[in-house]
Image: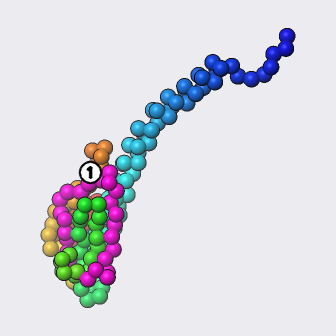
Amino acid sequence: MNRSAGFTLLEVLLSVAIIGMLVGVSIPVYESFVRRNDLGLTAQSLTALLRRAETYARAANYDDAWGVEMQAGTATLFRGTSFASRNTAYDEALSIPASVSSSGLTEVQFAKLTAAPNTTGSITLTSTTSDTKTITINSEGTIDY
């Protein structure tokens, strides 16, 4: 008996089918992980941006107030008492992934030296997987994430 070593067509087809099923199951899990990760990173980055605005205002950096403006797909750290009258040379933009949407506060300014916010409330970030993260700003300017 002379048999050559190798795989039969049935074994190859079964292996390809098993690999295909594993890939089919893992892609949705991976996409869900990516969406949750986008949400977490966006919340951390936005919190850091708000805290930087508060710190700059408390230190009277460039002798001015600082704030953060939320827009579709972007959060902007700006110098000045309002986003409309800001000095654009000092803008720092944070890109928000398309899988994350924001609601709540749209603009927060921190007063020079006191870092008191002009408004209080929260920013709610929601991912396409319906997970949410909330960032809250209280009257003393404390930012909770």
Locate residue 133, reporting x and y percent: 28, 53
Q: Quadrant of residue 11?
A: top right
Residue 58: give x, y in percent of width and height: 26, 81
Question: Does residue 18 sit above or below 106 in this rendering?
Answer: above
The residue lying toward the viewer, choosing from 101 and 9, is 9
Count residues near mark 1 (Cα–Cα under 10 Å), then give few for <14, some for 14-19, many for 20+: many
At x 27%, y 86%, the residue is: 60
Quadrant occupied by the N terminus: top right
Magenta range: 87-111
Q: Is residue 8 visible in the rendered structure shown here?
A: yes
Question: Could you say where residue 62 lies in the image, as x and y percent from the top left?
Answer: 29, 88
Query: Number of callouts in the render?
Result: 1
Residue 45, by quadrant, is bottom left
Q: Residue at x 18, y 77 (%)?
A: 84
Residue 55, magenta (yes or no):
no
From the viewer's perspective, is 6 left or right of 59? Answer: right
Q: Residue at x 26, y 83 (%)?
A: 87
Q: Is residue 115 visible?
A: no
**Vertical arrangement, residue 115 with respect to residue 134, above or below:** below
Q: Position of residue 72 (x, y in %)?
A: 25, 61
Indicate the amino acid at tag 1: Thr
Image: 69 above or below 7: below
The residue at 27%/76% (across/down) is 78
Q: In the rendered view, does 29 fall on the left or right side of 10?
A: left
The residue tagged 1 is: 126
Secondary structure beneath label 1 = strand
| Nearer to us in this view, 114 or 90 | 90
Quarter of the image for the C terminus: give it: bottom left
